[in-house]
Amino acid sequence: MDIIKSSAEISKMFSRGKRIHTPFLTIVYASEKTEGAVQHDLRGRVAFIAGKKHGNAVWRNSAKRRMRAICRDLQGPWAGYDVIFLAKSPVTRASYSKVLTACAKVVEGSELVAKGD
């Protein structure tokens, strides 16, 4: 899994990317072909962000661990897309199956998953 590490690239994604909201997290995605994007391999890249305002280090680590597992279960990263998973407070309190179901619904309705799959 390729990780987006540059804060400049993450800032660009927040300004130009499309957003998908769930009660547990927000998914920000942009095609690697968007204007100003740095070309990388076609496997796609991801970033997992859990902010300090929602909890301490234990909560942030737990939230990131859960988001990485969700990304794997949804067959991410998606080819040709950079994706950011942004945690909200309830991501660690809800059951894993509930979070996964909510994320699967919104990802299936987005451009990330080809309609023929």
Image: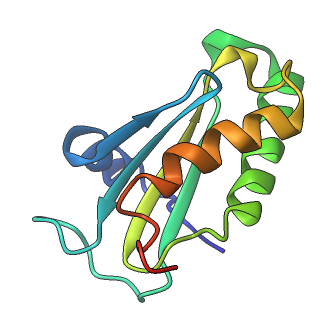
Q: How many marks?
A: 0
Q: Residue at x 69, y 15 (%)?
A: 89
Residue 31 percent coordinates (x, y):
28, 67
Residue lying at the far left of the rendered structure: 35
Give the vertical position of 72 relative to 24 (above or below): below
Describe the colour scheme in one phrase. Answer: rainbow
Q: Is residue 77 left or right of residue 111?
A: right
> Whole-percent x and y of residue 59?
83, 23
Identify the residue at image location x=65%, y=30%: 50
Q: In the picture, which quadrant includes the N terminus?
A: bottom right
- Residue 78 placement (x, y as % from top left): 50, 72
Q: Residue furthest bottom?
A: 41
Q: Nearer the viewer, residue 56 or 113?
A: 113
Q: Is residue 66 above or below residue 70?
A: above
Residue 42 falls in image quadrant: bottom left
State left or right for residue 8 relative to residue 56. Answer: left
Depth order, front residue of 101/69:
101
Residue 72 rendering spot, x and y as whole percentages: 74, 65
- Note whether 9 is above or below 99 in the view shown: below
Q: Is residue 77 above or below residue 111?
A: below
Q: Quarter of the image holding residue 74?
A: bottom right
The answer to whether 34 appears left or right of 81 in the picture is left
User: Residue at 42% of width from left, 89% of height from top?
Assistant: 41
- Point 50% across, 61% down: residue: 4
